[in-house]
Image: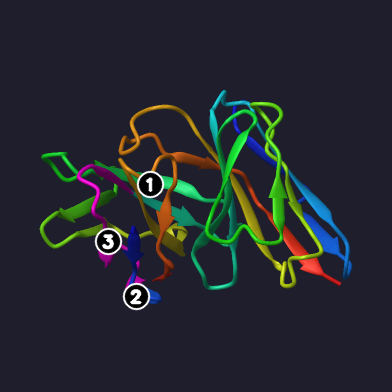
Amino acid sequence: DGGITQSPKYLFRKEGQNVTLSCEQNLNHDAMYWYRQDPGQGLRLIYYSQIVNDFQKGDIAEGYSVSREKKESFPLTVTSAQKNPTAFYLCASRGGGLPSGRETQYFGPGTRLLVL
Amino acid sequence: AQKITQTQPGMFVQEKEAVTLDCTYDTSDPSYGLFWYKQPSSGEMIFLIYQGSYDQQNATEGRYSLNFQKARKSANLVISASQLGDSAMYFCAMRGANTGNQFYFGTGTSLTVIP
């Protein structure tokens, strides 16, 4: 079945450690996104990529890094520079269509990151 | 700048009744799309309904309908015949013609359906 997978479901990070969250999609979508969600909050954009080997910072990119070497994959690294990384991280992808068109984002199941 | 505002942090509705979740937006884009998503306690985001800024009719998808008032910049979600499974967080989002592939989300409304 087509969809988006994220792993792991839960991730624990020690102080000063970098961790990488995986996001894979088999929907043949060009655009991929990473969002952070804090309790009781909406989604805030960390990074997004519209095409392979290209990505743009979102509203809260500091302390995070990404790569887009393959169309299917968009891993997110939470670096030690991110001082408050505890949150729920959602990956999404979107197919083509007009910018204001009805093509929605499709979301993965999310990764919960906790700091030990 | 794009902004989505959801002013109802929490809402309660009796089972089988209808409920309206509010969403207002601000944009200078001449063309844009509005989306509603449902987020159950498990965390996944589920797409519910879409409204284009130039659509002549309000969108409907099963028990979901969108009350779109362009002049007031509002896009309220109406859920008819509420079911217990409708209890979740609901997010309004927007994507504009001039914002590329970027979506903007509101802070969400928590809906609880009471038996």
Residue A33 shows in this picture: no
- Mark identifier at residue B25: 3
Left or right of A51, for residue B37: left
Q: Which residues are magenta?
A: B13-34
Left or right of B5, for residue A36: right
* Residue A47, x across and y down, in percent: 59, 49
Q: Which numbered disc, 1 or 3, marks the residue closer to the eye?
A: 3
Q: Which circle's residue, 1 or 3, is located before the other in the chain?
A: 3
- Mark identifier at residue A97: none
Callout 3 amino acid: Tyr
Q: Secondary structure at mark 1?
A: strand
Within 10 Å of the Cα at label 2, are there few (<14), some (14-19), or many (20+) other Cα atoms? some
Q: Which numbered disc, 3 or 2, marks the residue closer to the eye?
A: 3
- Mark identifier at residue B48: 1
* Residue B78, x across and y down, in percent: 25, 58
Q: Secondary structure at mark 2?
A: loop
Callout 2 amino acid: Gln
Q: Name the residue beneath numbered marker 2.
A: B8
Residue A112 shows in this picture: yes
Q: Secondary structure at mark 3?
A: strand
Q: Which circle's residue, 3 or 2, is located before the other in the chain?
A: 2
Residue nearer the viewer, A75 or B79: A75
Find the distance from the CA under tag 1 to the CA under tag 2.
Answer: 19 Å
